[in-house]
Image (tube, rainbow, N blue to C red):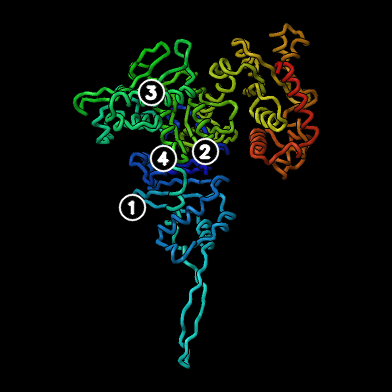
Amino acid sequence: MKLKSFNIRNYKSIQDTGDVQLCRGRIATLAGQNESGKSSILEAVRDFEELNFSEDSIPFGSEQSTQEINCVFELEKTDGDFWEQFESSLAESLKVSHEQAGDFLDTSKIKKAIKEFGVSESMDRDKKQFSISVNKDICQIINASVLEKETTTEVQKEDGTTETKTEKQRIIDLSDKNVEIADTLLANTPKIVLFNDFCDLLPDKFSIADLKTKNTEAKGYTAVKNFEKIAKADFVKLYEMDDLNRDATEEKHNETISVDFTKVWKQRIHADNKIKIAYKFEKRESEENSFVLFYVETKDKQKIRPRMRSKGLIWFLSFWMELMASGADNKLIILADEPGLYLHIRAQEDILAVFEELAKQGHQIIYSTHSPNLIETNHLERINLVINDQTKGTIVESITTSKIDSKNKQDALQPIANAIGFSVSDLALTNKKNVLLEGVSDYFYYMGMRKLLQQNSHYSMIPGIGVRKQNTLISFCLGYGLDWVAIFDDDATRGKDSQKKFQEIKDELFDGDDQEAQKKLYITKGISSVENMFTLSDAKLVDDGLQSKFDVAATIGEKRKVVFSKSFYEKIENGEIAKSKLSKTAIDNFTKVFEWIETQLSL
């Protein structure tokens, strides 16, 4: 199950986010500048989980007394027994006896009718009243699925004899049980957890007495318990062992957690990333004076206490432990607020690797960032921009929509622009081979067609911010010794930007040598825009209501082109568009470009 969308009203800087649609995958990014409202969004979703809006969430000076959060959850194939669990939980809540009534819902009927559901929570500050509800249509479907039970009664006739009558009656009436249904639905959704910058850091040492008494107020308690869970250790029991047995067990635990951590921590210290995370006991005459000691051991066997290592390493270790420990038992919706603030640029990529691993395990991750290093250029579809507008407050929009056009939007777009074209964080150090594209719509089409045509994926697609920025992208590739090629539209029939830029790059980099330039620069001859690589029938796979104009690009329209290309990509991702549905024209056009790319990049 995933959180598909949410709507937040009257919460801190938020007036009304509108319906924020998250991407179809399991990772979503909220990108925006500081003070844009990213943290407020995550805190609101956290408050939704806790069924309680924090007191400091009331917008200053707001005339509205009601705060509201609505979350829509989407059921997946792996949620096959969700409605059976819901039925069992609802029966317990309503005290429906299964022994007397048997199963009381036709869950197969519900499964066919309900693929997603929304739960709303609201707080009326004037009345100090909290309420929870679910869409009425959902309640009606569930109520209509209540089974009937045969009841037998003895009826006395006028002649003194009795007659047995059998009637069917609904087991229970759920028409007035909206709150109970909403509570039960919410209880069976994935738990939502928020991680932010006050993640409990692993201490240098921790008292055995505090462990025995479960002193949650002791500094580092949560991190120590996370260490125990991941290493499969019990420090209190280990403390009570004799020294020889405990030493052997310690080594096993230390090896377990160190191997797991090294898989995600890729940063090198003295040319080696093999860091041993370990503990040992310091036993004294009393539990109060006995401790578990924690240390980090490097390749040269030097043991260093956590507080003496970089804050980035210890923060990453503690954050990783908390994520792993929290997600060990059940599927989660993980909210991460500005992860990796203390980390080096390259170490921030390790955070992304952890998120990918969690997503593979079935968790959903929603994280906020204003760092281009946490923007994945291969997954622009994951991004929602968070913008603080002077009149509308905090709003959220996809990078492909245009609800608002302002300096704030430009600021929110900057980390994305950096990540996809102007930052050393991505281009300079990781991607050895790159295909430079004119814009975001080109990116979505080429990514989708690469997957559909099963083309080589050992290179990155890098979308620019229009063709005029192509030389900047090329400069980064040249400056950092990366292999690259660039794709240009043949815009002779419309604007001249692509041809002008091609000529400019040819003159600057290849001294006007057309033959040498064509080894790196490709023009789609006779095709004025990426949309015209397709036919109208291809475009109708995305929108069958298109009305034909003189070419596909004009049919789609300039204002709609990025949204349309994203929809095309998503339909390929979820299997709605297959290669067999595409025209031969589109297949031939893209195959020709991909073959050129592979040849020039020596793939």
Residue 504 in the image: state x and y as whole percent. 70, 12
CA gap, disc 1 to disc 4? Answer: 23 Å
Q: Secondary structure at mark 4?
A: helix
Amino acid beneath label 3: Glu
Q: Which residue is mark 3?
A: 251
- The number of discs equals 4
CA gap, disc 2 to disc 1? Answer: 40 Å
Name the residue rendered at 59%, 33% in the picture. 381
Residue 348 in the image: state x and y as whole percent. 48, 22
| Other residues around mark 3 within 10 Å, as few (<14) / some (14–19) / many (≥20) | few
Name the residue rendered at 29%, 29% in the picture. 241
| Other residues around mark 2 within 10 Å, as few (<14) / some (14–19) / many (≥20) | some
Name the residue rendered at 43%, 59% in the picture. 91
Q: Which numbered disc covers residue 127? A: 1
Q: Which residue is mark 2?
A: 362
CA gap, disc 3 to disc 4? Answer: 38 Å
* Of marks 3 and 2, the one in the foreground: 3
Left or right: 274 as drawn, with respect to 287: right
Q: Secondary structure at mark 2?
A: loop
Left or right: 173 as drawn, with respect to 309: right
Q: Is residue 146 above or below residue 472?
A: below
Left or right: 503 as drawn, with respect to 371: right
Amino acid beneath label 4: Arg
* Of marks 2 and 4, the one in the foreground: 2
Marks 2/1 in contact by CB < 8 Å: the verdict is: no
* Of marks 3 and 4, the one in the foreground: 3
Q: Is residue 295 above or below residue 222?
A: above
Q: Name the outermost residue toward the top.
A: 511
Q: Secondary structure at mark 1?
A: loop
Q: Which residue is mark 4?
A: 46
Amino acid beneath label 1: Lys
Work out whether mark 2 precedes mark 1 in sequence or the reverse, and give the earlier one.
1
